[in-house]
Amino acid sequence: MIQFDDFNLGKTGDGLLPVIVQDAVTLKVLMLGYMNREAFDKTVQEGRVTFFSRTRGQLWTKGETSGNYLYVKEMFVDCDSDTLLIKALPAGPVCHRGTTACFDTPDEEGFIRTLSEVIRGRHAEMPDGSYTTKLFVKGVKAIAKKVGEETTESIIEAVDGNRSRFVYETADLIYHYLVLLEQMGCSISDLEKELALRHR
C-alpha cells in the first residue's frame, strides 16, 4: 500500500503532493489538486478523494457540497515519487462549472469505455424496453449474428468508399461487439492486455 512517506517532496517547499485525478473508466484526465499528509490519509481511509486547499488552508473532500464525490479505484506513484495519479469513479461532474472535467478536452474522449459501462449496467439490471436487454435475452448466438451483419455492412461501405456511411455502420458494429464482449464476460481491458502481450 502507498504511504505518504513514499513520496519525495524535498526538504524545501510547502510539502504538498500534486495529485492528478483520472476517470477510471474513460481514462479522461479530470483535475489536478494537492494533498498534505492528512488529506492523503483521509483519502486512503475513506476511499474518497480529499485535497488540501491552498487558498483556504484546509482540507476539502471533493464533492462534499455537490455530492459529486471522487471514489478511489487505484493509485499510482510517478517515476520520481513526487506526484500521485488517482484513478477514480466520479459521482457526477467534477468541475465547479458543471463540466465533466476541469480540462476542456472533448467530451467524446473515452466514450467507448463509457458505453461499455452502460452496457454492463443494462446486463446487470435488464431494464424493460431496452434494446440492449433484448439482445441479452436472445443470447450469444443472436448477438454474434448481429456482429456479423454489422461487420458485413461496414465492409460494404468501406469498399464503396463511403466514409460517412462507413463510420455509421462501424459505430453499429462497435456497439454490438461491446454487447458480445459483455455477454462473454470480457472487457475492453482484456483486449488491451492481449494486444499489449502481442506487441511485446
Image (spheres, rainbow, N blue to C red):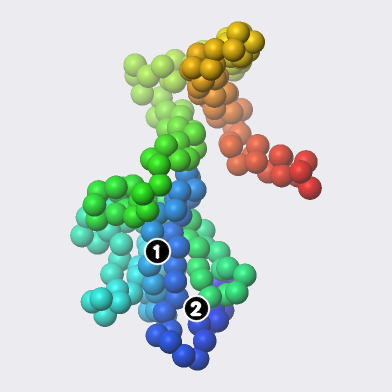
State which tag comes first along the sequence, 2 or 1: 2
Compared to residue 99, the image places residue 37 above or below, namely below
Is residue 164 toward the left or the right of residue 60 in the image? Answer: right
Compared to residue 72, the image places residue 115 above or below, namely above
Quadrant of the drawing holding the N terminus: bottom right
Mark 2 element type: helix
The residue singled out by tag 1 in the image is 32
Q: Residue at x 53, y 75 (%)?
A: 82
Task: Mark 2 vs mark 1: give the one in front.
Answer: 1
The image shows residue 191 at horizontal and vertical percentages of 65, 37
Disc 2: CA contacts within 10 A as few (<14), some (14-19) or many (>=20) = some
Q: Nearer the viewer, residue 186 or 124?
A: 186
The residue singled out by tag 2 in the image is 4
- Amino acid identity at mark 2: Phe
Is residue 57 toward the left or the right of residue 160 in the image? Answer: left
- Amino acid identity at mark 1: Leu
Q: Residue at x 38, y 59 (%)?
A: 31
